[in-house]
Image (cartoon, rainbow, N blue to C red):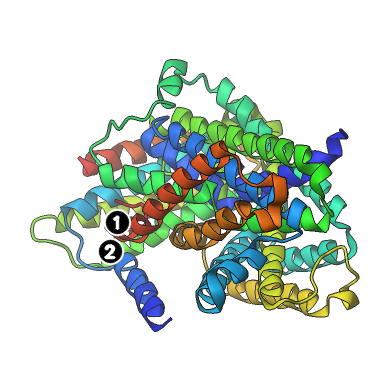
Amino acid sequence: MKIFQVALGILAAIGGFVDIGDLVFNVSAGATFGYQLLWVVVIGVVGIIVYSEMCGRVAAVSGKAVFDAVRERLGFRTGLMALVSAQVVNLMTLTAEIGGVAICLQLLSGLPYRWLILLAGVALAIVVWVTSFDWIERIFGYGGLCLLVFAVAAVKLHPAWGAVGHGFVPHMDTESPLLYAYFAVGLLGAAMTPYEVYFYSSGAVEEQWGPKDLGLNKVNAMIGYGLGGFLSFALMIVGGALFLDKGIEPEFLGSITLGAEVPLGQIGLLLALVGILFAVSGAAIDTLFSGAYNLAQFLGWEWGRYRHPSGAPRFTLTWIVLLVLALGAVMTGVDPVQLTEFAVIFSAVAVPLKYKPILLVANDRAYMREYVNTRLANTLGLIYLVLIMIVSVTAVPLLILTNVGQN
Amino acid sequence: MRRLCAAALLVVALTGSNGGTVDSHALKRDAEKVSSLATEGELLANDMAKGASTKYFARVHAKELSVAASDLADALGKRPTSPGIEGDVRKLSRLAAKVSRHLEQLHLHPTSRTVAKSLEQPLTDDADAADELAK
């Protein structure tokens, strides 16, 4: 198996799992609760692996991506609700990611933020227009691997490894249980954010996977999201080891890169900035495509980056419009970091609407033939469906009760 | 859909309402924020003094922190306070303004190790003073 073939999972993981929201959420969780919430990341990673594998399998066997299934299984009205909620959250996330790209470029170049927003928008448009899907995966997926510098930083900060190990066992040692619950819900929501799954399943159709690729699908989901989870651990450990004792609340992208600069100096800082730039750019492309995929699949349009733009004109127009809308929104001066926190919480609210139809289709023999869910996949799928329903019900009350995590 | 929009507006209204009276809880939170900004500034200054940062990062990040401290100073200087804590609130406002000025110096001299070195202790002192107010 060629190493490049796992790029889809790595892009989905780096661009989806470790986007601007995860960077901030994971480091903030570490800075607030130390290593206590590491176990939540494990649960989130397993969940996203379960559902991504299912989506990839459905796409490979039936050629259907997520919103094909949503439209078919939920009917038009409920499907439309799912679509609207997905598009709103996608646009919020895309806005935040473009803002994140501009902040990163500013931290690297010192140039004015608003010019860099435009530069980021134009650069993303050019990349998406001229670069093949395969190369988009490779450039941003592998470029984002520079984020591994946070794993080195975590080790260099000499965390209390016993406490890190204890963090993988669910426990709560805090006077702020609501804030703890808010971070737990946020971390789960961020890990299982649905645009990763839209992108992953549509990407499988883009790459024309068939049943012969089911092994690759498993490897992609496990390695890609496993890597994303590993990076989340590293970020949380950096937050706990560097910021918790000092009482620092990391609110900026620059604060997070300090986590690599302090133990590793300039090289750590530059690798962190480059890694974040690629990861956040990858997330911007994920969300941009996801928005266009969702609409095109729901309305039955021709779609796919593998087609010439004239072969899928409405799909192409959709991503261009989304990009322009997001650029307009970020130019208003909205704080990308705060926006992404809202996006994560709101996406958690609507998650069950997207995962339920996937579970149904993955069990339908008419589509899946001998590739229907195994008993293990169904058990895990059901457990996670219940879990994300709880997350979906509690997300907004916790957002309000903790004043967006400010307690 | 109408219910969804109403819920979204309610959330924004409820979560965005932190511009009211400063009570002792808000004072504690804001003091912790000022301490956080000062401590982060001290970390940055320390790296700059060692030559472990870059010119553009130091300039941009110091400005972000400085603006955040300045915004806090402005808000604390204007907002009404609960009885008995006005003195502490205004004191915290002045402290936040001082932190902002120190961070502004880092922003203006991103390559000067001497300036960075000279600001480490003042920023540590600022953080300690904010911690006192948070108690």
Q: Amino acid at mark 2?
A: Gly
Q: Amino acid at mark 1?
A: Ser
Indicate the secondary structure of the residue bearing disc 1: helix
Q: Residues within 10 Å of mark 1 (few under 14, many from 20)?
A: many
Q: Residue at (71%, 78%) from the top-left corner?
A: A321
In the image, residue B130 above or below residue A337: above
In the rendered view, does A266 fall on the left or right side of B27? right
Work out how far the residue at label 1 is from the one at label 2, CA to CA, in angstroms.
Answer: 6 Å
Q: Tell me the tag on residue B77.
A: 2
x and y percentages locating residue B55 in the rendered image? 68, 44
Name the chain under label 1.
Answer: B
Kindly check if marks 1 and 2 are in contact, taking CB atoms under 8 A apart as contact.
yes
In the image, residue A35 above or below residue A124: above
In the displayed orientation, state which residue is furthest to the top: A162
Same chain check for tags 1 and 2:
yes
Q: Quadrant of the N terminus of chain A?
A: top right
Q: Nearer the viewer, residue A116 or B92?
A: A116
Q: Residues within 10 Å of mark 2 (few under 14, many from 20)?
A: some
Q: Residue at (90%, 78%) from the top-left corner?
A: A310
x and y percentages locating residue A319 in the rendered image? 73, 72
Indicate the secondary structure of the residue bearing disc 2: helix
